[in-house]
Amino acid sequence: MKVNVCCSGSSGSTLLGYLLDGHPSIYSGPELNLFTKLALYERYDLVKFCSTFLCKYGLESYPFSETKPFFDNLDRYGISQEKAWGWVNSSKNLKELSECFQQFILEKSNKKIWVEKTPRNARVIKTYMDTFPEGKVIHIIRDPRDVILSLERRGFSFLKSCEIWLAAVAAVDGVACNSNLLEIRYEDLVTDKLKTMRSVCDFLNIDFQEVYFESDRFRSRGFELAISLCAWENRISTSVATSSVGKYNKQLSRFDSIYDMKVTDAYAKAVGCEVNTNIRTLMEKYKYIVPLRENKTVGYKWRNYEASPTMKRSLLNAIFHQRYYPILKYLD
């Protein structure tokens, strides 16, 4: 079985992946980035034809994936670029390619379930679920205000941080009714780890025991750990600190402008979510406290946030018929 874990960046997917890897049936490792490229879903034969070039230069496909490499962290899995692209060229489609990765990883880890944890999976989740209708998807959500603060500490601008959260959560909202989707809140995972992990185990139809998530007894061997920048690294038996929850309260007024930010019509159509999906309605859906609505349209104009204008001139994106979609609209 393969499980797709997706989210906005800085929403807790690394914590979730680390906990999942403690289960005796589950391997969860570093972000592989296998499922984020639309070209692998829609133009696989062309990817094979251009494989030598793509292996060297990659392919940006904003707004779905903003990184050029087709695969990340191959060395941490013990997979060479030559082996990975050999699998690309010997496979007929993305499903067959994913089976090559899955077989290699599960044989090496001696486990039964592969969790592919890449936050950017969220932006192509509708296409993924159409391609893998039997696949399980776990979406982890975190309060956007805490996400924005975390992303800003990593060097992203305020508007870019808003876009990252909205792009991911709006895309998953488009498949919210799919029975193979489980959504959990980061805050619930932090404050009641065992209850949340029990719900995950029930969703995956595997047994739950507290020891799986309180010790390293069943942790995967033979691979590098997925964790790199976590205060709780190698201390799974300790409680996860709750200090990462609600940090925004100390600077609440900074976020007055985010609640009416919404997706553009083009992005809504591309990912299959409702037109005018905005941060306020998504926060209300996931039971985050939102200030009362204020009429801020007078004297303001809607503007698109242009995050990656250079892609419009990309020859590779013309070859692969990939269009540039601005994601975020805000009042300026």
Image (tube, grey):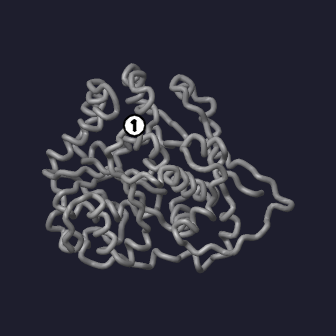
- What residue is shown with label 1? 70
Q: Image quarter for residue 33?
A: top left
Q: Which residue is more in the foreground, 191 or 254?
A: 191
Residue 259 at what x, y percent from top left?
Answer: 66, 65
Identify the amino acid type marked 1: Phe
Query: Residue at coordinates 86% horizontally, 60% vertically from top-left?
Result: 299
Quarter of the C terminus within the rendering: bottom right
Query: Residue at coordinates 31% horizontally, 60% vertically from top-left?
Result: 17
Q: Is residue 173 left or right of residue 225?
A: right
Residue 215 at what x, y percent from top left?
Answer: 19, 72
Q: Which residue is more in the foreground, 55 or 252?
A: 252
Eyeballing the image, is 303 above or below 86?
Answer: below
Residue 59 at what x, y percent from top left?
Answer: 47, 33
Residue 43 at what x, y percent from top left?
Answer: 44, 26
Query: Residue at coordinates 55% horizontally, 40% vertically from top-left?
Result: 62
Query: Residue at coordinates 66% horizontally, 44% vertically from top-left?
Result: 265
